[in-house]
Amino acid sequence: MAVMTCSIRPHMRNRLYALVALACVSGGPAHAESIQAPASDAYLHGRAAVIDGDTLEIAGNSIRLADIDAPPLDYACADPKGATVPCGQRAALFLKELVGLAAITCIPEGRDSYTREVARCSVKGVDIGAAMVRAGWALARYGKTYQAEQEDARSMGAGLWGFQGPLRFGTGGQ
């Protein structure tokens, strides 16, 4: 009987155990040996620096959060009284507070037009993209992944949705 050893992240261990158990039930032990855990280098993991509202950096890797678009740092909004508010900086600050000093895990999905990794990232089990959209500091883009979170944010007037004017700040390069 072959012994399968691999190095996996602790949060993925339960998923791997479930996959192996399912394979054993459905196809026997020989089938279970063919299941491979994702390579540990397929993940980006560590403390992140916030570049802007939808871009992080981990160990020198620039990471664009998948399926969201946050305003650039220099983007300004107008409050209900017409005063200028630095919305791009607020989005980045929200992301910085969300990430804090905790280690984050990102699963790359490809690269964008600026050659950054495009990835789904989480911190303490929370999907960072979903949290940014739900708080109203990013828009759901490039798919339908975060549409429900965006509708909630819009209906509550959260984040960017609490300001005047259309939300147009670019394509974000994805």
Image: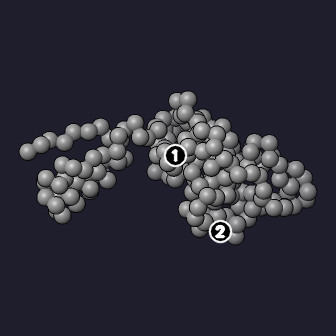
Asked which quadrant contains residue 31, the reply is: bottom left
Residue 18 in percent (x, y) is at 26, 56
Residue 110, disc: 1
User: Would residue 89 appear left or right of 116 to someone viewing this image?
Assistant: right
Residue 93 in percent (x, y) is at 69, 43
Identify residue type, mark 2.
Glu
Task: Name the element at disc 1.
Answer: strand
Residue 144 in percent (x, y) is at 58, 64
* Marks 1 and 2, how far apart at CA: 27 Å
Choose the circle earlier in sequence order: 1 or 2. 1
Count of numbered labels shown in the rendering: 2
Q: Residue at x 78, y 59 (%)?
A: 167
Say which of 68 and 171 sits in front.
171
Q: Can residue 131 be seen at all in this image of the molecule?
A: no
Q: Residue at x 51, y 39 (%)?
A: 102
Q: Can residue 163 be seen at all in this image of the molecule?
A: yes
The 10 Å Cα crowd at callout 1, few under 14, some 14 to 19, many 20 or more, is: few
- Name the residue at the left extreme: 1
Residue 151, disc: 2
Asked which quadrant contains residue 89, the reply is: top right
Task: Name the element at disc 2.
Answer: helix
Identify residue type, mark 1.
Gly
Q: Is residue 75 above or below residue 144?
A: above
